[in-house]
Amino acid sequence: HEGCVSAIAYLPGEERFVTCSDDGTVRIWNVENGEQEGMAMEHDGPIWALAITRDGKMIQSGGDDQVLRVWDVETQQPIAEWGGHEAGIFSIDMSPDDQLVASGDFEGRIVIREMNLDEHGRIKHAIETDSGVVNSICFSPDGTKLASGHDDNTIRVFDVENGDLILGPIEGHTHYVLHVVWSPDGSQLFTASADYSIRFWDSETGQAIGDACQWTGHTDYVNCISLSPDGTKLASASDDKTVRFWDKGSGDPIGAPLQHENWVQAFTLTPSGEFVACGEYSGKVSIWRV
């Protein structure tokens, strides 16, 4: 990539992964040889978010051009192009059953739409949060809730069926909330922030959990986090040029940080938890065995 790698995700099977970048492209890569597969998929401007359907057949991407594009993984051809935003798209997530896609933008709007090509991605809800940038959105494991992290330092949880705010705004972070993920059982929310910390919360009450509710160690923005498949470890990537691993139960660091040459803007664990792919501000992508 010729610009910052803004998002990265593995395709099912762990043999390929997908990246998007400020250079306006989405690309598919072969894990084994590091070669790009097929053509670059392009937007009119920087791309900040992507998601992949669980069956691995389609990619959704969004960015500065305010359009959500759907691509065929095998042909790299556009399948659909959907509006609904009046600002750049900064976050995207798919529901666990692949039936819905949610996108958040620079002005605080969250759009939940049906992943139905025949219905042209019919919008189910358009939610105005008035919270600044929607940095991250994430469906709960059962698909009934949608959590979001915002530039006003808060977390919100919405009911997917009716679009209502059911929890929040949750306060506690002292700077932007950059990433939010659910625990595998849906009982907890984990958040990464520009205040250099990782926190976790009871997803029913919004209360911070226990004495270890705030994990510190990073020395710059924590851009993204991911839970291991078994839910016992959490990994985090930061502008301090490291990826770190934590014990979810105690919050204690595990092993040495993975050192990078640049800010780590995006990363993803393989479904098996064996490898981590990291995308840097420079456009470089690296794969580590963990």
Image: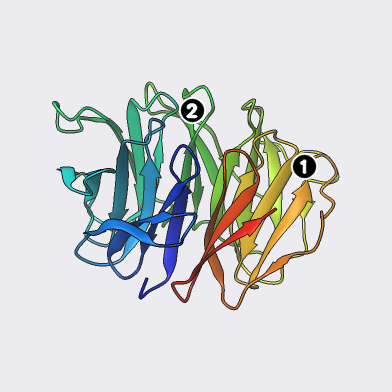
Say what secondary structure mark 2 lies in: strand
Residue at image position (48%, 54%) is 31
**Residue 164: % across, % down:** 42, 28
The dot on residue 248 is 1
Check disc 1 and give the amino acid type: Lys
Mark 1 surroundings: few (<14), some (14-19) or many (≥20) residues within 10 A: some
In the rendered image, the quadrant that contains the N terminus is bottom left
Residue at image position (60%, 71%) is 239
Q: How many marks?
A: 2
The one nearer the camera, 248 or 66, is 248
**Residue 155: % across, % down:** 55, 45
Mark 2 = which residue?
A: 145
The answer to which quarter of the image holds residue 55 is top left
Q: Please say if 221 is above or below 88.
A: below
Say what secondary structure mark 1 lies in: loop
Q: Is residue 82 visible?
A: no
Is label 2 in contact with label 1 (beta carbons under 8 Å)? no
Residue at image position (75%, 37%) is 232
**Residue 176: % across, % down:** 55, 60
Q: Please say if 124 is above or below 272.
A: above
Residue at image position (23%, 47%) is 69
